[in-house]
Amino acid sequence: MFTGIITDVGAIEAIETRGDLRARITTAYDTATVDMGASIACSGVCLTVVDKGPGWFAVDVSHETVSRTAPQWVAGQRLNLERALKVGDELGGHIVTGHVDGVGTVLGLCAEGDSQRIGISVPASLAPFIAAKGSITIDGVSLTVNEVTDQSDGTAHFAINLIPHTQAVTTLGALAQGQAVNLEIDVLARYLQRMEAVRGQS
């Protein structure tokens, strides 16, 4: 379980193709305090530490994960990192599971004061579960949806604002038009999604 509050920005140092992909990720975390088997969210994807050393850790990325996430599994890619929530930690964002629900596309960016307004397109499968003033996780970052506009093809466009701090301490400050991003809908919306699917079968 995570909160969507990023505590480090690492980078994929190397990719090794085995049965799955093994990614070696640089980090400022004190890896002596990171247990083998620990969960770390990597740009919103919950992954398990399978190896580590000073200044780096390694994770295995399954074909399923690669197929359902943004094309970020390449050497040099910067990643938003968050260690798993511990009992008693401050919940500064919202409850995040690290399970990506879909991939969105950056439609455009524009300055609003010192902040940056970002428009993102989402597939029809996620559109009903994104609401104005609700929570959304973008590449692992907990954010608030400002507005949502439904499209005639069933997809939706939504907008968020990035304050200067978020731009500085996450990878989102470098977003570009057309870029793919990992999206996780609010956990309550995920349960609603399941209930709606079951209701549709009855």
Image (cartoon, rainbow, N blue to C red):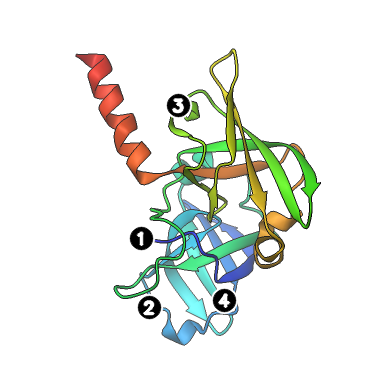
Residue at the image position 52 percent from the left and 73 percent from the top: 57
Looking at the rendered structure, the kind of residue marked 4 is Trp
Q: Helix or strand or loop: what does disc 2 sit on? A: loop
The quarter of the picture where the C terminus appears is top left
The answer to whether any part of residue 70 appears in the image is no
172 w.r.t. 85: above or below: above
Label ID, residue 128: 3
**Mark 1 and mark 2: span between their CA atoms?**
16 Å
Q: In the rendered picture of this protein, how many numbered marks are placed on residues?
A: 4
Q: Is residue 10 left or right of residue 29?
A: right
**Mark 4 and mark 3: span between their CA atoms?**
39 Å
User: In the rendered image, which quarter is residue 89 located in?
Assistant: bottom left
How far across and down, in percent of the image, does residue 65 sit?
47, 45
Q: Helix or strand or loop: what does disc 4 sit on? A: strand
Disc nearest the viewer among 1 and 2: 1
In primary-sequence order, the first of circles 3 and 1 is: 1
Looking at the rendered structure, the kind of residue marked 3 is Pro
